[in-house]
Amino acid sequence: MSQMQNDRKTDRPWLIRTYAGHSTAAASNALYRSNLAKGQTGLSVAFDLPTQTGYDSDHVLARGEVGKVGVPIGHLGDMRSLFDQIPLEQMNTSMTINATAPWLLSLYIAAAEEQGADVSKLQGTVQNDLIKEYLSRGTYICPPVPSLKMIADVAEYCYSNVPKWNPMNVCSYHLQEAGATPEQELAFALATAQAVLDELRPRIAPEDFPALVGRISFFVNAGIRFVTEMCKMRAFVDLWDKICRDRYGVEDPKFRRFRYGVQVNSLGLTEQQPENNVYRILIEMLAVTLSKKARARAVQLPAWNEALGLPRPWDQQWSMRMQQILAYETDLLEFDDLFEGNPAVDKKVEALKEGARAELANLQSMGGAVASIEYMKSRLVDSNAERLNRIERNETVVVGVNKWTEGEPSPLQTEDGGIMVVDPASEQEQISRLNDWRRSRDPAAVANALADLRAAAQTGANIMAPSIAAAKAGVTTGEWAEEMRQVHGTYRGPTGVSGSPSNKTEGLEELREAVDAVSDQLGRRLKFVVGKPGLDGHSNGAEQIAFRARDCGMDITYDGIRMTPEDLVTQARDDAAHVVGLSILSGSHLPLIEDLMQRMEQAELGHIPVVVGGIIPDEDAERLRQMGVSRVYTPKDFELNSIMRDIVDLAGPS
């Protein structure tokens, strides 16, 4: 272990961020300015689901989703409001945006130019990783091949015009949330980076390519097994260095540096005894800060109550203070790498690298990341199923969930329920502002800008310049995305859940017998329709419910994400469902379920039991039951077999 050098300069802290945005651009702007005043050193923008998936706030699919999981940005006016009194030339801004990344970056550049900023000095990141969207998060628009081209458009444009901007943040964060093992997270992320660089290589002069490689960054997850996670980060550093040198011929070490930001694992936060999450977040942060060789360049932490709902400003402040205490009060940044030469660490790092290289070679033999999307998705669903099985079997201990479940009530959950609730009226207000914007713009300028954008997309030209021109002309997010849909088509990603009969029976014998018995009574196989209404792309829960139901012998229908209530009612009717199960994690459960239940009654399907799962406060759960929902499940209901027994009981003849 290195000795502290008393005369050595203390390392600079990482960028301290909180992932934030909600309700409206003006409300989010106030939150950003407050957080910056509290010592935050960079911005991390959360966009709402309509913005992420390319719909205006008044689109049918946007209903109930506006401003829920982030800020709605429909046009340049919203972007202008979002960064009011925040000088973008001096800011480092991370934007978690993928399918609409070219568009949101165009709006950001247009807003910066209005402020008088030198665009070449802008610093920040767009995530711009569509491959992980097909695998885990679900906010894709177009098919993989044209999406890869748009990723490369952003990188090519930024290299020439916004050289300090990171044009892609290869995101393995959601891969871990979807169940990836450390080896899978390493391999799938590196395969994604290779796919993008392979696409970019022919576009860039050979002498300039190493510098462009140096602009690719990563966004990773750090879970609770923090020694393994720290070793994973060291493995990332070594593997990326070798790929840059051997595959792409990058000689300069600074262009081979593994540059990454991190949010620690929200999936591991528990609804039960939520105060325990404070310790989980701290321990997970250590994985990406203790090792200087593999220290994150930017850190954002979830709040203790994210398994309950939307954190309040105080909750976000608490997580930010955690970073500041580690960075400024401890002596961590005075030391060189604490783990260099540690035999246990070196052994684990080599094992992770070996496993990742084997998986990476497997992906390359299939043709790379884009060609392997269905394979990777099925592997993630399998890995996540095994993770949940270990918790159910008590092989993995989760404190307060499957061990030491008795405890005192949390005083942190105050009269507001311990979370912030978005005012439902903000959606209609956003739609009103959107309509005002449309009325105020020059229709001819908008039409010309959209025509130029369409032409660029059709001919294969870089879409960034016409996108920036469209932003300045007043084009909306939905209009921009519709041009991409018209030219490239829409896409439905793989679910990773086969509908074919399962031979996985271990531990499920009694449930399979119960399904057989009820099916005999019904005169056909118990039919369970699983759906995700709205734009929520967090499909892990729905996938695991469908996966287990299939293993129990039910006949399942699960067609993936982004269904309207009307679609799901039609599916329930056409498939003659015995039970309908719905999953919503975006906070839009009340309006979407109310719409669906009304449509079920109108279609004379009110007799079919409906069960709902998601991050649902107790008060909302009671309202859902009053609407006629038979069961409501939240993250505390982790025993899937118990849910399966409920479905069998509900399906049985009354």
Image (cartoon, grey):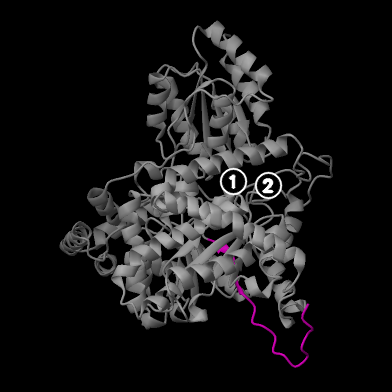
Instruction: Residue 12: say if magenta.
Output: yes
* Residue drawn where x is 35% and y is 41% of the image: 60
* Residue drawn where x is 50% and y is 14% of the image: 525
* Residue drawn where x is 41% and y is 40% of the image: 562
Read off the residue under disc 2: 417
- Extreme residue in the bottom direction: 7
Q: Is residue 305 above or below residue 14?
A: above
Tell me the distance, in whole angstroms, between the alpha carbons under discs 1 and 2.
29 Å
Question: On the picture, is 326 further left or further right than 371?
Answer: right
**Of 166 and 75, which appears nearest the observer?**
166
Read off the residue under disc 1: 179
**Which label sits in the foreground, 1 or 2?**
1
**Magenta region: which residues?**
1-20
* Residue drawn where x is 69% and y is 64% of the image: 287
| Residue 92 pos. (x, y %) | 50, 75
What secondary structure characterizes most of the magenta part? loop
| Residue 237 pos. (x, y %) | 58, 69
Q: Amino acid at mark 2?
A: Gly
Residue 325 visible within the image: yes
- The quarter of the image holding the N terminus is bottom right
Q: Amino acid at mark 1?
A: Gly
Q: In terms of sequence position, does the residue under pointer 1 or pointer 2 come before the other? A: 1
Give the class, few, some or many, for how many residues have Cα within 10 Å of label 1's Cα (few <14, many ≥20): many
| Residue 549 pos. (x, y %) | 57, 26
Instruction: Residue 510: say if magenta.
Output: no
Question: On the picture, is 286 further left or further right than 44?
Answer: right
Q: Quadrant of residue 7?
A: bottom right
Question: On the picture, is 223 further left or further right than 553?
Answer: right
Q: Is residue 196 above or below residue 624?
A: below
**Of 6 and 241, which appears nearest the observer?**
241
- The quarter of the image holding the C terminus is top right
